[in-house]
Amino acid sequence: MLTNYLKIALRTLNKNRAYTLLNIGGLATGLACFAFITLWISSEWSYDRFNEKADRIYRVALTIINETESFDQAVSSVPLGPNLKNDYPEIENYVRFDQNDAIVKNETQQFYEEGILLTDPSFFDVFSYRLTQGNPKTALRDPYSLVLTESMAKKYFGNENPIGHSLTILLHDSTGRGLPYKITGVMPDAPKNAHITFNFLASFETLIASDRRQFMSSDAWGENSYYTYVLLKPGVDSKSLAKKLPQFYEKHIAPIMRKYNVSGRTDYTLQPLTDIYLGSHRRYEIGPTSSLNNLYIFGTVGLFILLLAGINYMNLATARSVQRAKEVGVKKVIGALKSQLVSQYLIEAFVLVIISFVLSLGLCKLVEPLFQVLTGKAVSISTSPGLVGFMLGVSLLLGLLSGLYPAFVISSYKPTTVLKGSFSTSAKGNWLRQSLVILQFTITVILLVGILVIHAQMSFIQNKDLGYSKDALLTLNINGDRDVETKIEAFKNDVLGTGLVKGMTTSSSNLVGGLGNNGINTIDNQGKKISTSMYRLAIDYDYLNVMGMKLIAGRNLSREFPADARTDSTQNYLLNESAVKALGWKSPNDAIGKPFAMSNRQGTVVGIVGDFHFNSLQHKVEPLAMLVRGDNFARIILKLDMQHPQESIAWVERQWKTHFPTSYLDYSFLDKKLNGQYQAESRFATIFFYFSLLAVLIACLGLYGLTAFATQQRTKEIGVRKVLGASVTSILTLLSKDFLKLVLIATVIASPLAWYAMNQWLKGFAYKIDIQWWMFALAGLLVVGVALLTVSFQSVKAALMNPVKSLRSE
């Protein structure tokens, strides 16, 4: 009997190839899309969860509260970890990080390397990392000891054993030429699904040894430039421990604040390790973070696509079952039992969904390399047996639901009723299909509005005026090289010798997300003293001109004013507009001449610069003070002639080799660095776009199938109308209007839902677009247009059919 059912199922599917292809193609595509979205979400969710003690690891983060602002930051001070462990028995261990980029040299080559972490020996106790060579207890114990990842060991030493050898690193030394770091261990490359990434691990004792007096003094509490993680003992309640941290502040920090007459306070927060990547957006994060909202959005899109595919499948299956109602009637007349009819329908449905499931796995393997490039994640369906099982379960459930409806409903009809065709005009059958079409296109409109809003926001980001000219700016990294710092003026004179370089300036920090903050003192309009903190940028006299920044009050820092030059105790300052507002001054002009001190360096406000963005547009522009740099600096910025970009870069390279023959040249364009800030958002927008288009395609496949069914149901009606003189246009309108009504209803339902979802996404940006009415109108028009094209194909075909054939259809 089972073999007979399978033969009938395969013959039926083969006989109705168009229906079979639509059903299998739509469901397979939907399952594959859902699989990829699930893989992406799973990868994002997995961050840091590979650590065996992840549930007991917390980062100690700070909230700084002063007279003018309150902000959260990920960094803390060097003494924090040891004192927390000493004061609280609930803490089993701690580990600190200092993140750096630097030039790394061996005997024959040198490279600019990112991801150099200075850390404590406890790193291997707290986190689940292991050494393939070396002793984890001693590898990071001594100053200037270094652990390499396997890829770095291969890069610098090939197949030779690196243990005992040294690499020279320009890191935490005053020579400007680098110091040797002894290699004490080799470890596997760091996992990609960790918010802390690195290529080298150096001993944290190196940092302390470079200036032991500073890091052992009470002033070290004010240097918040490091990251502190604690491992709690088993069974410790982190919330109870967090309630004790204000006492820690009163014991260690409050006396120092009173000593220096600094107002405000610091609150400590314990951040669970597994919450950092998706839930932390503090200042100075140790690495790029993502957003939990993105997971919710993609999860919703994945469910939408799966729902669309399921609706398509059930819609086509139930619609097709109406055409087979007479077949059922005939079988019942000749003695078929209801159980036999139910079994036949279910087997046909299961055969179709199993084929769809197998095809979806093939699609996944075929498209997997492209998806990995698109997302930057090495995800694979092969390593996710649970996901494959879930997809199979969804397929079988859809087969069960789509098979049960016709099996039980149609098989329960009396043969006389079925053979008269009453079911084909069943109000219940029509209502179900119409409801499912409305749901399909509600989802489609939501996704199209999402595409429009996300595209508009990304376009806004790329084109917004940042307050300076970002084009044609080439940034050279100095990396602590003293040769460059001492010979910079000669290099500047020569590099500006032709028109290939239009201007040159230097600064202490990278403008894109690289500024630190310091405490400041000034007075408000009533002469009241203000103690707060703000961002700091040390520059030279040409900085504003080269960067194209606008001075809106006062004057620029200038060589003509000796007081502008930085000394140990004095320094004049430029502030931005946000600083003026934060400090309560009425206008930029009102700020000029006000006394101003940063890090106890007294001076005066001599100019106000228009606000410019030094963080991403996800953050508002915050108060900033600018001062003339000292002898040390970190960046050279060149404004190139972009009509001859290759010649300009080649000229810079030649001058660099002439003046600094032993120094490594590391450069990048500023606009590329800016775009890198939005890599996650850009990738999100691209993935959302492609999957939304696939969802629209799946919806259209279903609509095409239903249109074909509806047209076939009205074949005789069309023939009669044509005989009576109906035009092609009138028949097209007749067949299209019912579907277009459903699309319009879906647009009305979808608009408020889409507005809410996109408004939640835009909350992640301090500077954002307003959601406009035309986005909903355009999404609705696009859906109407796509639906009309889909319906028209079948409608025109039916309208052009010879009425003689139509009337002979049965």
Image (cartoon, helix red, strand yellow):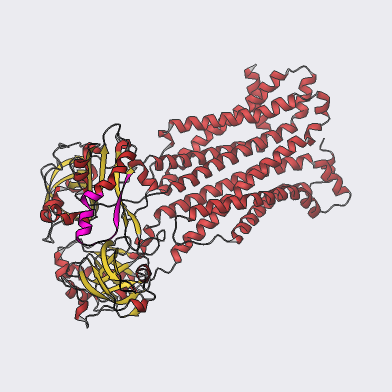
Q: Taking 703 as reference, is 504 above or below it?
A: below
Up/down of 210 relative to 310, above or below: below
Residue at the farthest right position = 724
Counting labels gives 0
Q: Position of residue 541 (x, y in %)?
A: 25, 76
Instruction: Identify which residue, 793 or 343, lies in the foreground.
Output: 343
Q: Nearer the viewer, residue 28 or 249?
A: 249
| Magenta stretch: includes residue 159 | no
Task: Estimate the x, y position of residue 772 in percent, counting from the top left.
Answer: 58, 61
Is residue 720 toward the left or the right of residue 354 in the image?
Answer: right
Residue at the farthest bottom position:
560
Quadrant housing residue 581: bottom left
- Nearest the viewer among 76 and 295 is 76
Horizontal arrangement in the rendering, residue 649 relative to residue 565 (left or right): right
**Which of the pair 580/660 is nearer the observer?**
580
| Point 43% across, 46% down: residue | 292
Q: Which residues are magenta?
A: 249-270
Does 500 sit above or below residue 16? below
Residue 269, magenta (yes or no): yes
Q: What residue do we see at 38% from left, 60% from top?
A: 616
Q: Quadrant of residue 5?
A: top right
Q: Residue at x 81, y 32 (%)?
A: 422
Q: Position of residue 539 (x, y in %)?
A: 25, 71
Q: Could one spot residue 352 in this view of the protein?
A: no
The picture places residue 299, in percent across and down from the top left corner, at: 50, 42
Task: Answer with left or right where residue 372 lies relative to residue 141.
Answer: right
Q: Quadrant of the C terminus?
A: top right
Horizontal relation, residue 134 to residue 400: left or right: left
